[in-house]
Image (tube, rainbow, N blue to C red):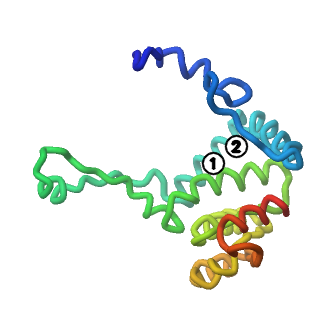
Amino acid sequence: MKFNNVDFDTYFKNYPDANGYFGKYGGSYIQPELQTAMNEITEAYQTICKSRKFIAELRRIRKEFQGRPTPISHLERLSDKIGTGAQLYVKREDLNHTGAHKLNHCMGEALLAKYMGKKKVIAETGAGQHGVALATAAAYFGLECDIYMGSVDIKKQAPNVARMKILGARVVEVTEGLQTLKEAVDAAFAA
């Protein structure tokens, strides 16, 4: 299939390249201080993701713990109401354990951390959903968990902060700058 002179039958076999580029676009910047850790994670993932045991365990977790696959629901009355003939469907990610899609990547990342022999996972959060998801994954695998969150967000999202703590996470209050997600991200990377 071609679109805008791009042959998509071969495109995805060639891109992204080893450096993350799509032709002259793409790539990524990682602070030099983080490059060693990112290389370690990348190398471990490249090996572990091929393991039948890892894949089977992740599939079991998705099905038995997370409640995946989540259903696709037809919104029949809304489809009729808009009156264009279009049929609307929603993917019910709200039915995931913890109520959001964020658990999808957190369980995989925590499982990878377990396979790598790590004892702790670290993340940032703003509204708290990511923090709750990672705290859930950490509790499931018996890992320590530090969640960096700005002071402003801690006050606004008290129920999610309580959930993280109940799950055993240490919520680290970030008091620099605007005391919101941006500063929490910086603090998590610095940890």
Q: Quadrant of residue 119?
A: bottom right
Residue bearing the label numbered 2 = 54
Left or right of 59 in this view: 33: right
Kindly report the distance in space between the C-alpha atoms of the residues bearing marks 1 and 2: 6 Å
- Residue 55 can be seen, yes or no: yes
What percent of the width, then of the height, locates residue 138? 72, 65
| 4 versus 183 height, above or below | above
Q: Residue drawn 54% across and 59% down?
A: 66
Residue bearing the label numbered 1 = 58
The N terminus appears in which quarter of the rendering?
top left
The C terminus appears in which quarter of the rendering?
bottom right
What percent of the width, then of the height, locates residue 42? 78, 39
What percent of the width, then of the height, locates residue 65? 56, 60
The numbered disc on residue 5 is: none
Query: Which three-letter amino acid code belongs to the residue tagged 2?
Result: Phe
| Number of other residues with Cα within 10 Å of mark 2, as a class: few under 14, some 14 to 19, many 20 or more | some
